[in-house]
Amino acid sequence: IKPQPIDTFDIENWFRRCPYGKVGDRLGVKETHYRWGHWAKNGLTKAGKQAWKFVATNNEIAYLDHPPSLINANRSRNINGWIKRPSIFLHKRFIRIWLEITEVRVERVQEITEDDAIKEGIIPKWKDGIPIRHDGSGGICREAFARLWDSLDAKRGYGWEVNPWVFVLEFKQI
């Protein structure tokens, strides 16, 4: 949250200003995918090197869970083929996973629970059927989340130890 609330009195109004959506909003999950098309020359970069753009030649698409058999990654020839595309380029009409926001709240990042860390994508590590715990405080997934958080946000002044206020959004798949 920028700027950070000064005290808990401010918190009540912050969830109304969440820039990520409100309860009932629907969000599409963009995925890495393959599109049928080719790379075309597109002028020069600022450094004077050849710039390229992707040109889709039809509406065919494949996803990572069912990739095409032949993938064309060659930019040197203007030939059509299946080309892997980052999720940012997935058009809305091709989105397969839709989420509905069911809850928006504000809390301190250190309030995250072990279950919440798993929902964030942290995968517990096990050895011989026993969870690997790093320092014994909190859960293993929560600790891993703290390290991930610091790797992304500590340099910007919002590290785990600062315990910044964050927006928490809960979803359901629709």
Image (tube, rainbow, N blue to C red):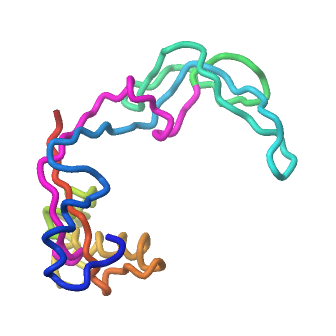
Vertical comparison of 164 with 49: above or below: below
* Quarter-of-image position of residue 75: top right
Q: Which residue is more in the foreground, 58 or 16? A: 16
**Residue at 20% over, 56% down:** 169
Q: Residue at x 17, y 68 (%)?
A: 13
- Quadrant of the snapshot with the N terminus: bottom left
Q: Residue furthest right?
A: 48
Query: Relative to 1, is 33 above or below?
Result: above
- Taking the image as shown, residue 19 lies to the left or right of residue 86, namely left
Q: Residue at x 29, y 69 (%)?
A: 145
**Residue 99 place in picture, x, y as percent:** 22, 39
Name which quarter of the figure residue 15 lies in: bottom left
Q: Tell whether 99 sits left or right of 41.
A: left
Q: Position of residue 135 (x, y in %)?
A: 24, 85
Q: Is 101 placed above or below 119 here?
A: above
**On screen, 148 above or below 70?**
below
| Residue span colored magenta | 83-111
Nearer to us in this view, 172 or 25: 25
Quadrant holding the C terminus: top left
Q: Within the magenta stretch, is there residue 50?
A: no
Of residue 146 and residue 111, the one placed in the foreground of this image is: 111
x and y, in percent, of residue 168 in the image: 20, 62
The answer to which of 137 and 93 lies nearer the viewer is 93
Task: Determine if the magenta segment contains residue 103.
Answer: yes
57 sits to left or right of 41: left
**Total residue callouts:** 0
User: Which residue corresponds to the image point at 31% horizontal and 78% vertical from the top-left?
Assistant: 4
**Residue 98 pos. (x, y %):** 25, 34
